Amino acid sequence: MTKTWKYTGPIFDAHTHIGNKEDIDALVQIGNSLGISTQIGIVHTKEGFEAARRHHPERFVFAKYLSLENIAQYNVQPVIDEISNLKEEGYSLAKTWFGPRWRDYYESVTGEFRIDDIRLDPVFQALEDADVPIIIHVADPDTYFASHYKDSKKYGVKEDHLIQLENVLERHPRVKFQIPHFGAQPEIHRLSNLSRWMDAFPNIYLDTASSRWMARELSKDVEKARDFMIRYQDRVLFGTDVSSTENSRINYNRRVNAQRILWDTDAKNTPLPFTDPDTKDSGGTFINGLDLPLGVLRKLYWENANRFYRT
């Protein structure tokens, strides 16, 4: 595993989570050692938010989790109020999570819930009015639907989750969307649909969290994956999905290194530097590097997110 990467400049990690205040300094220190100088911090606790603002005022761009409990009940006014006050509180963007298993955490979520329900349109209109970008997580890896989400009556099917998000994108062309996990479509057979989205919706950006998902799927066809990255080089943000909790941050360097092998190098069949639960019983995950041009790497690691969130 090389430590002499093609790109050597600063890195903007556009997808991290901050929780307890005791964990934040360690997260920042590890990030510093990896070249990360700025990051989006998705806030999980008020104490962590206040500590990060106080001790690392220039480090974070803060994302506020919107009330999923209210969204689950289509109770939009409190969510609109959150969006209206968000910037005054010190946040720059919003975050929502609609991975299929959110139904396991919120009893009020029924199988009939849809993010494209017109009752949620005022929430997206509020984002547009306040000029607040949103990270919106919808769907999960294909492997999860084959294992964790076999109960389709409860969790739905992936294609329908993607259709719901596409309907939202069509109705709200002026909202700035960051869609994590490569739009939940890094699988090679889904890149054509993702390309269609990128062409149809110039207001969407992708991020590259999580490392194992990106490495596992994009390595399966280097030519197609490389062509995609070059074609949409201005709208992909580097992200790790790392959390400030100890169990997550101890793998921060491994997650970053996995992506650096994927993006910076022409490595062949290099083992993922940590365990991929989705492949541990079938031989493991191996990385084939895309060897992206330096100009593309510069945009991926720094320029795109810095332009989107800092300028």
Image (tube, helix red, strand yellow):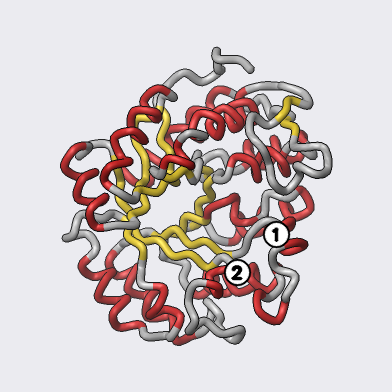
Q: Is residue 289 above or below residue 115?
A: above
Dot 1: within a 10 Å radius of its alpha carbon, few (fewer than 14), some, or many (20 or more) residues? Answer: some
Counting from the top left corner in percent of width and height, residue 133 is at 37, 59
Q: Residue furthest right?
A: 282
Q: Is residue 77 above or below residue 44?
A: below
Q: Residue at x 70, y 27 (%)?
A: 289
Q: Quadrant of the N terminus?
A: top right
Return the x and y of residue 44 as percentages of the image width and height.
34, 57
> Mark 2 near mark 1, Cβ–Cβ under 8 Å?
yes
At a point 78% along the width and 26% down the height, the residue shown is 269
Picture disc at residue 144? 1
Identify the residue shown where x is 42% and y is 34%. Answer: 303
- What label does residue 100 carry, if any? 2
**Residue type at numbered disc 1:** Tyr
State the image coordinates of residue 228 (x, y, percent, origin top left): 67, 42
The crowding category of the residue bearing disc 2, from other C-alpha atoms within 10 Å (few below 14, some 14 to 19, many at least 20), is many
User: Residue 11 appears at what percent x and percent y?
Assistant: 42, 30
Image mark count? 2
**224 sits to left or right of 38:** right
Q: Decide which of tag 2 and tag 1 comes sooner along the chain.
A: 2
